[in-house]
Every structure is written in C-alpha cells, then in structure tokens.
Amino acid sequence: MSVIIHTTQDGCTIKFHLRRTARKNIIVRVASASMLSVNIPPFVSLKQLQQWFGANEMALKRLWQQSKTIKTELPNTIWYRGQRFSYTFAKGLSAVQWYQQQGFLLPETSEASALDILRTWLRQCAQTELISRLQYWALVMQQQPASMALTQARTFWGVCRRRTGIRLNWRLIGAPAFVVDYVCIHELCHLRYANHGRDFWAMVAKYTAKTHDARLWLKQHGSELFALDNVR
C-alpha cells in the first residue's frame, strides 16, 4: 500500500492510501484522520487515476473535509497473541517494537500515524504467523487448499473455497494460539466437507479438542479484535 497525493485546481492537497484490488471500479473512502483510501483495478494507471481525481474533485473534497473531523484515539490496550498489551510512545523509534513484559513501543508521532504504523505491523505479523500455522495444519491433515492468504473481512474469521483457497482474517493475530488453530482446522475440514454436518464436526474433533473453548473465546472477545478498525 502506498501514499499518493492529488492537488486540486484550487490548491487543496489530498492524501490517499492507494491499494489495487480485483474490483472493476475505483472506490474512495475516508481511511483515517486527514487521509482517504482509494482502491483501483489493476488495469488503471496512475495517470488515469489522476485524471479521474480531476473529474471528481468536488466529491473528493467533501470526503477530505470529513476526514479532518474524525477523532483518532487508540484503545487502551492492544490484543496480540491472545493477550492484551499496553503501549507507550518512545522517541527515536521509526518502527513498532514489542516486548512480552513492556508491551508495545510506538514511534512518538501523531496518533493517526501511530495507528497506521501499528496496523501495518500487526498485518505483517499476521501474514507470517497465521499463514505459517495454516501451512502446518494443511501438512498434518493432508489437505492442500488452492492458495492461502489473509482477508480484511469484518464478517467471518475464515473462508474456504475449493477454487480460490483459504482466507484467514488478519485480526486473528490478536487471538490465542488455540483459537487460530481451531479456525485453520475448521477451514481445512471444509475442503472435504462443504457443510457443517456430523462428518464435518467429527473431522474437526479429530484434530482439536478445543472447539468449544475457541468458539466461546471468539464470542466473548472477537469484537475486541476489531478495535483498531473502529478508530480512524
């Protein structure tokens, strides 16, 4: 994800987080305080995007003004690997640091910037740790999905499709290991059983005895894993 800037005809400078997606349309939303996000199809060039900005400046300026009114405030604690950790701002840092005892050390900058830096750091950890765990269980269970990736979805923890593979919600980086394992096992079992019938749950039980505990943890704490999404 990169940042691009568009200057309107009357001199207003608007910042965008740029992300390429498989969707066919250009989509602009308020991303954070004084920042918009723009999702563009892979076939749209940066020159074409700037032309599109120029043709839609009025709408973009309205969104830009909305972004400036957003209050950015980090939650008191951050979920990571099944525990809540506090955070402090430290001078001289350019990246997030995490320690089991101290919690998170964040670069001393605006809260909006710190939020973006922390989200990026957590997503990178999720890419490494969650996919590694999914690969482990795929090997143990001898179930190989077409692909393995993360998703930003807000409505499910994992999804399995035979043709496109398994997607895990990146926010599971905040959950305990037994919860991550359960979601991985659950989705891998869908490669054999598409529904949630008796055979499906029997297969899940073969690889984890913590289905009830994992589902209960997600019911109790799942919404808290979206805390950083609720701050913009």
Image (tube, rainbow, N blue to C red):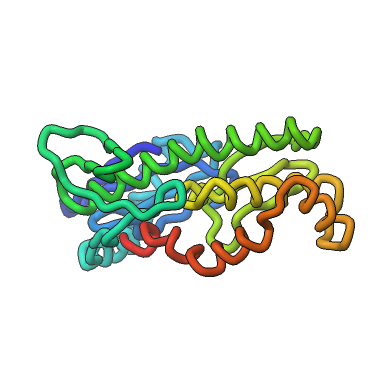
**In the image, is 131 to the left or to the right of 163?**
left
Residue at 25% of width from left, 58% of height from top? 33
Where the N terminus falls, by quadrant? top left
Res 59 seen here: yes
Number of labelled discs? 0
As drawn, which residue projects farthest toward the right? 199
In the drawing, does residue 93 fall left or right of residue 157?
A: left
- The residue under the point 32% across, 41% down is 100
Q: Toward the viewer: 198 or 57?
A: 198
Image coords of residue 215 (percent x, y)? 62, 63
For the C terminus, the image quarter is bottom left
Considering every residue shown, the one lying at the far left of the view is: 91
> Relative to 29, is 160 on the left or the right?
right
- The residue lying at 81 percent from left, 58 percent from top is 201
Image vertical order of residue 142 relative to residue 213, above or below: above
With 36 as the anchor, is 180 left or right in this view?
A: right
Q: Position of residue 203 (x, y in %)?
A: 83, 50
Query: Residue 207 placed where, x, y %?
Result: 75, 45
Q: Residue 92: image x %, image y %?
A: 12, 33
Q: Which residue is at a point 30% across and 39% down the rendered structure image? A: 98
Q: Quadrant of residue 90?
A: top left
Q: Nearer the viewer, residue 76 or 161?
A: 76
- Foreground residue among 106 and 180: 180
Look at the image and tell me whether residue 23 can be seen.
no
